[in-house]
Image (tube, grey):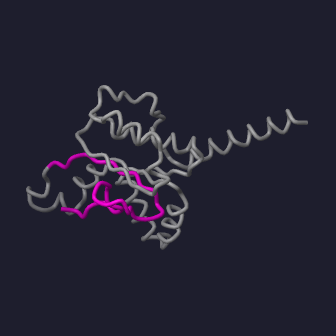
Amino acid sequence: MRTLIEAEIAARDESNLRGRIKQAGFPVVKSLDDFKVQTSSVPQATFNYIAGLEWIRAKENLCLVGPAGTGKSHLLVGVGHAAVQAGLRVRYFTASDLVETLYRGLADNSVGRVIDNLLRVDLVILDELGFALSTRPEASSSSASSRRPMSAAAWASPVTGPSTSGATSCPTRPPPFP
């Protein structure tokens, strides 16, 4: 009987994990174990803090900014997978996909439900923020100065509230458009 119960519990845990990974919507499978700290500009101590996930439990935000190819997306997806493995509910978006989802919700009057669903997860990951800022419609139709290249950015945030630790953390909301 014990063996059957243990097998059932293991099967349920695996099913729940697969469901959380599917719900997260990750574009690829990346792990923190595969992230090469030595070849990135992320200090080992910073990587260890990020990988420890304590910042999620402390309701802090994570903001990664840098040029393309520096590992921001890999680190965010790896953190997301680690959070799912730790039993947290995660949702991944590119910035443009999140904006599109919200606009679609406005169009069909379901934006409240979209936001409610986002508030049910433990961690929202927003990737490719720089791409969304540089491709927004008003930037493409205005002067050349507003079309300057944007640095790529990524943002991860526990959805339960603002940070209280002061100036060393990222803001709860992304900065306003320039």
- Report the side of 93 relative to 68 (left or right): right
Q: Main secondary structure of the magenta part?
A: loop
State yes or no: residue 56 in magenta: no
Q: Position of residue 135 (x, y in %)?
A: 24, 54
Q: Position of residue 28 (x, y in %)?
A: 46, 37
Relative height, residue 87 to residue 3 (above, below)? below
Relative height, residue 79 to residue 119 (above, below)? above
- Report the side of 160 relative to 65 (left or right): right
Q: Position of residue 72 (x, y in %)?
A: 33, 40
Magenta span of residues: 149-178
Quadrant (top left/top right/bottom left/bottom right) for the C terminus: bottom left
Q: Residue at x 43, y 70 (%)?
A: 107
Q: Quadrant of residue 99?
A: bottom left
Q: Residue at x 50, y 61 (%)?
A: 118
Q: Residue at x 32, y 55 (%)?
A: 169
- Report the side of 72 relative to 176 (left or right): right
Quadrant (top left/top right/bottom left/bottom right) for the N terminus: top right
